[in-house]
Amino acid sequence: MKRENAAANAAAGLAAILFGASVVAVRIAVRDIPPLTLALVRFGQGSLVLLVAIAAFRRDLLRIDRRDLPYLALLGAIFFAVFPVTFNVGMRYVDASHGALLLATMPLWTLIISRFAARDQLSVRQSIGVLTSLLGVAVVMADRVGGSSTSVTGNLLLIATAICGAIYNVLAKRMLGRYAGITVTLYAMLIGTVFLAPASLVERAPRLDALSAETVAMVVFLGVFGGAVSFSLWTSALRRLSPTQVAVYINLNPIAATLLAAAMLQEHLSRTFLFGFVGVVTGVMIVNWTGPNVR
């Protein structure tokens, strides 16, 4: 493996672990902070951290062609406006481990969207992998729902979140041919934060002094590590690897989230959930381990 590709794989893996930790952080923070406000604060912090870092060390990376702003705005709307809103709202209704597993379907949606965009057909093996993982998702969605409309809503919102991530994975490749990953992340995150600002006005945000120390810590983590660091690593990996190759690392997400949820939230996993977990991960592995022809 080339050194550049090894670094890209490491970046994608670390980003996925941070995403898994972010699932738990959001699950904790969203108890006290409304979802739109939480998304605004998270990516507002992230944008500021990236802007300061780039201005201090690589000011040349701030330069972009104005003609690319609409495309970057599209990326920002998808990944830093719609994505966090559906994610944060969905996490109000499902456990952290449950939500992380639904996000683990992102590689499947990435493959399907990229294949559709390239007008390619899925192989028989890939089709089996897709069906296997979707079966696992169906099992997870049925687990502990018990007819609850809120659980169904949470499941659907998390699936929508995974699809948004997949769309970003495919569309971002165009900009990454022109700019560094951190540049694309900065502008997309900054524009996404602007999109979030008006929406958050409909929520009544709590006063800072009313928040617990745990909630404040989670918000800071989400802004710095779950925002600036993780998304920069993820987008940088997309510059070197294919969307599907990067997306497969999201499978580390439920593992990290499950371990942290068990430790911090005392969540207990049912046998049905574990069966669904195996189905999702097995399906994704089948899809992505189909030989060198898979891009």
Image (cartoon, rainbow, N blue to C red):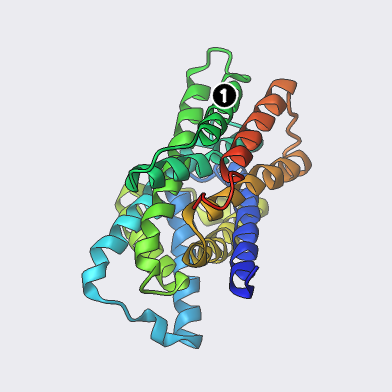
Q: Position of residue 141 (x, y in %)?
A: 56, 24
**218 vs 88: above or below:** below
User: Is 94 placed left or right of 190 in the picture?
Assistant: right
Q: Secondary structure at mark 1?
A: helix
**268 vs 295: above or below:** above
Query: Mark 1 belongs to which amino acid?
Result: Leu
Which is more toward the observer, 37 or 211?
37
| The image quarter in which residue 24 lies | top right
Residue at 72% in and 39% down: 265
Residue 252 in view here: yes
Which is more toward the observer, 195 or 249?
249
Q: Mark 1, residues whose alpha carbon is within 10 Å: few (<14), some, or many (≥20)?
A: some
| The image quarter in which residue 48 lies | bottom left
- Extreme top residue here? 147
Q: Position of residue 80 (x, y in %)?
A: 41, 54
| The image quarter in which residue 139 lies | top right
Locate the N terminus by quadrant.
Answer: bottom right
Residue at 55% in and 34% down: 125
**193 vs 91: above or below:** below
Q: Position of residue 72 (x, y in %)?
A: 31, 63
Q: Position of residue 177 (x, y in %)?
A: 38, 70
- Extreme left residue here? 67
Residue at 47% in and 54% down: 243
Q: How many marks?
A: 1
User: Is 121 placed left or right of 250 in the picture?
Assistant: left
Which is more toward the observer, 283 or 266?
283
Residue topped by disc 1 = 135
Which is more toward the observer, 93 or 181?
181
Residue 204 in view here: no
